[in-house]
Image (cartoon, rainbow, N blue to C red):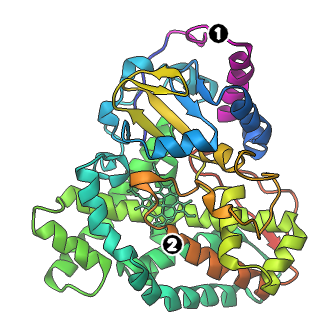
Amino acid sequence: MTTHLDREAPSIAPGPRARSWSRWAVTPPLVAFLASARLRDRPDRLLSLLRDHDPIHRSPFGFWVLSTHAEVEATLRDHRFGSDEVNLDLDLLRLGPLHRMMGHGDVTYEGEFMDVSHDLMLFRDPPDHTRLRGLVARAFTPRRLAKIEDRVEAVADELLADLARRPGFDLMSELAYPFPARVICELLGLPQSDHELISIHGRSLAVGLDPLPSKEQLREADGAVVALRRHLEPVFAARRSAPRDDLLSDLVGAADDGDSLTADELLATVVLLLIAGHETTANLIGNGTVLLDANPEERERLRAGTVDPGRAIDELLRRDPPVQMTQRIALDDAELGGRAVPKGSIVALLFMAANHDPAVFEDPTRLDLDRPNANRHLTFGGGAHYCLGASLARMEGRIMLPKLLRTFPGLQVASPAPRHRPSFTIRGYERVDLTV
Ligand code: HEM
């Protein structure tokens, strides 16, 4: 969805010749990283190569890649960079060869996919972004969140109780996905029985967020929107005739007064909450559990309650972020670290590289649940688009992970080791088999 935009490129020869040796050192592994599942499992060497030798990297495919904490953070807050793809200059991009290397074949997008994407606040700039965000922000005030905290606890308890008599289970399908899906139902005011629908379609939608989705993935994402629309439209109609005290009724009301939310924006906003709040939190639980399994002392501290669970969740988010990157588009000719970035360029911001920057985090690849500055991670982004659900996600992690460890003190990740899903924006596992 972020870039269903492509140009036919004649060959896979790199673009303008790089001037320094370091750029040559970085480019082939970067491409391999995008294409290879093995490198997805062990990204740290490549990320430090990028940070150390070419922190403002111009890839031969025409986009820029930022990897230091300072640059990623500054660009997220920089008004010269926006999120709306109408400002993208396609002539600067050569993504065709990259698609072919990733096995997608010749991908050209005609723009008929994911027709909600231009109505998502995530891909809008002010003033539309400000208006859309303002409407949803009221659902995430500390008071509203405190009101649903008991329900989040109850949902976690119910799911864990269902698993308690099993000798083992797949964490992802049995707990990590259903949990946030049920919480979003709670937040929006949808029946709990909708959580399966959200789980199935949420995953397809999240893959559509990748910077280089295949045509197949986009088709799937598009199908998910159609299915969700079919399901949600009667629900919108029901709220219209009988509003309740829930977020869905607030949003339907805003759509009905005509000025604040169009019908398309209403659907897009609900779909965004379903994607943004589901796949991400599921992978916080999946990645977090695998990390804790690999670090038994830290895991014991969380289980025993000798570390602050809030700080521990931030450290897990820092160490293995469920969202690895985002992108911005230069709204004007700009300069980054002394390099000229032309108007219309795409700039990829690598959260994981920033989160492992030794200039900010001491011994960055070590998991330290007591790390004093863990919350300086950029996993929730920053600036105008800073994650609206950050407090909710932290609450979900803080509630679920210690409960999981206490319910199953002997829990272990079974072999073979879990494999990462073939997606790039979202970082998470296909499945995580546990023995308990
Ligand atoms: C661990 C869990 C989560 C992570 C890592 C995460 C990460 C992010 C990131 C990085 C962005 C900014 C993207 C950008 O700047 O381009 C974002 C935006 C957003 N997130 Fe989250 N998120 C999480 C959970 C949630 C939850 C639970 C919800 C709500 C139910 C949510 C709702 C949103 C919304 C609505 C936006 C768009 C904000 C805007 O464009 O102004 N997120 N999230």
Image quadrant containing the N terminus: top left
Q: Residue at x 71, y 71 (%)?
A: 312
Q: Residue at x 72, y 56 (%)?
A: 319
Q: Does residue 279 lie above or below 84 as drawn?
A: below
Q: Nearer the viewer, residue 18 or 430?
A: 18
What residue is disc 1 on? 19
Callout 1–callout 2 Cβ contact below 8 Å: no
Residue 249, given in percent of the width and then of the height, sits at 24, 78
The vertical placement of 91 against 80, above or below, is: above
Is residue 116 among what the camera can see? Answer: yes
**Residue holding disc 2:** 391
324, 163: nearer the viewer:
324
Image-based side of 36 in relation to 227, left or right: right
Q: Is residue 284 left or right of residue 250?
A: right
Amino acid on which disc 2 is placed: Ser
- Residue 209 drawn at (x, y percent): 47, 46
The residues colored magenta run 10-35
Q: Position of residue 359 (x, y in %)?
A: 72, 45
- Which is more toward the observer, 351 or 5? 351
Q: Position of residue 20 (x, y in %)?
A: 69, 12
> Which quadrant, please, contains the C terminus?
bottom right
**Type of the residue with mark 1:** Arg
Rendered residue at 31%/38% (across/down): 112
Cα separation between marks 1 and 2: 44 Å
Picture layout, residue 77 above or below residue 322:
above
